[in-house]
Amino acid sequence: MRLSGVVIFSIAALCLAGCTSTSGVDALQVPSSETTSSVVRPPAPIASVGAADAAPAFAQEEAMDQAVAMAPPEPVESIEPPAEPIALVAPKRLARAAPILAEPVQRYRFRDAKPINFGRASPRHLAVHGVDVSRWQGNVNWDKLRAQGANFAYIKATDGGDHLDPMFRKNWRNADAAGLKRGAYHFFYWCRTAGEQADWFIRNVPRVEGALPPVIDVEWNGESSCKRRPSRQKVLEKMQVFMDKLERHYGQRPIIYTAPDFYRDNLRGAFLDYPFWLRAVAQHPSKVYPGRKWVFWQYSGSGLSHGVRGRIDLNVFHGDERAWRNWVGGRQMVAEAE
């Protein structure tokens, strides 16, 4: 009896040691309660990604696969770490031996399900058009999208503190293979700390030479499970923490994407030394965001292309081909407002 008791006690001790040896986010399998998609779900389901499509394509892929364990929602009231001051200088880029040039610019060939007459301010007068995509575009034919006139693509990467867009890795890989300049964006969730969200983005988006600057997508979104609308001061504090952390990691100043109502409530007169990507689908940005400098203009949410089923967001760069090549080559400047 004594020997059996010792054996049982030893086994129990070993099991307890094994259970306590795993800690941190990778040990948690609690489903997230966040719903933060910034795109309204289409009526038809999107086909799932096949195993072959989801195969790793870059060196950090295996590490990224380990990072997708779900973290639990944080308490309702969270305390932001203080924002660290950052020099207001032109965006720095990762060191390179020689400049990376953009592919030849493809001319605009998109159609629009709901075309807007912008008059003399039409985005068609600008040379460099592109798209932004998420899982809701399904399986994108990037070669066809490129042929339609997409020179760049911003790809949905993360939401909040524990959501990874299931199409991100495939889109990230295939957009580059088709010759588009690519960048990743994060949909900001107001019920999590900014530092946690920055860590999640960094954990899932590789630091790749030649990539476009990362984007923070800030807007009021009725589809989100987080209904909180912080004060303007709190919004700016949280954004600064997030952007400082990304700039230190990627060596590029992040771009701020926003919509008219959020801009009106929070961003007028703020972040004058940051590049902006503005949504304005009925009027030119100069009418919707008077005096604001911008780099990208999202001018349509109803674009049509042979590369995707359904509709896609259309965007344009604020400058000619030469300005585009300078910008992607590392000599980034914030474009002047018109």
Image (spheres, grey):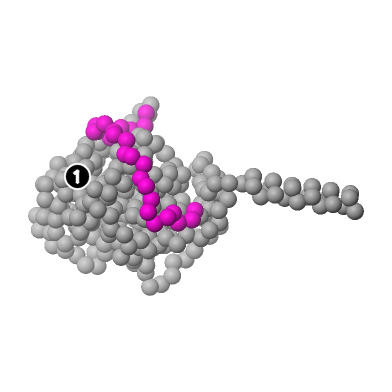
- In the figure, is residue 32 to the left or right of 275? right
Residue 199 versus residue 259 in the image, above or below: above
What is the quadrant of residue 244 in the picture? Answer: top left
Q: Which residues are magenta?
A: 71-95
Residue 328 percent across, percent down from the top left = 29, 38
Q: Which residue of the protein is positioned furthest toward the bottom in this rendering? A: 43
Q: Which residue is mark 1?
A: 270
Residue at 64% over, 47% down: 20
Q: Is residue 84 within the magenta segment?
A: yes
Residue at 52% over, 40% down: 59
Residue 152 percent across, percent down from the top left = 31, 48
What is the quadrant of residue 114 in the picture? Answer: bottom left
Residue 190 percent across, percent down from the top left = 34, 55
Residue at 17% over, 55% down: 264
Residue 235 percent across, percent down from the top left = 27, 50
Give the residue type at disc 1. Answer: Ala
Q: Is residue 14 within the magenta segment?
A: no
Q: Which residue of the protein is positioned furthest toward the left in this rendering? A: 120
Which secondary structure dominates the residues rendered in magenta? Answer: loop
Please name whichever residue, 172 or 87, is drawn nearer the observer in this view of the structure: 87
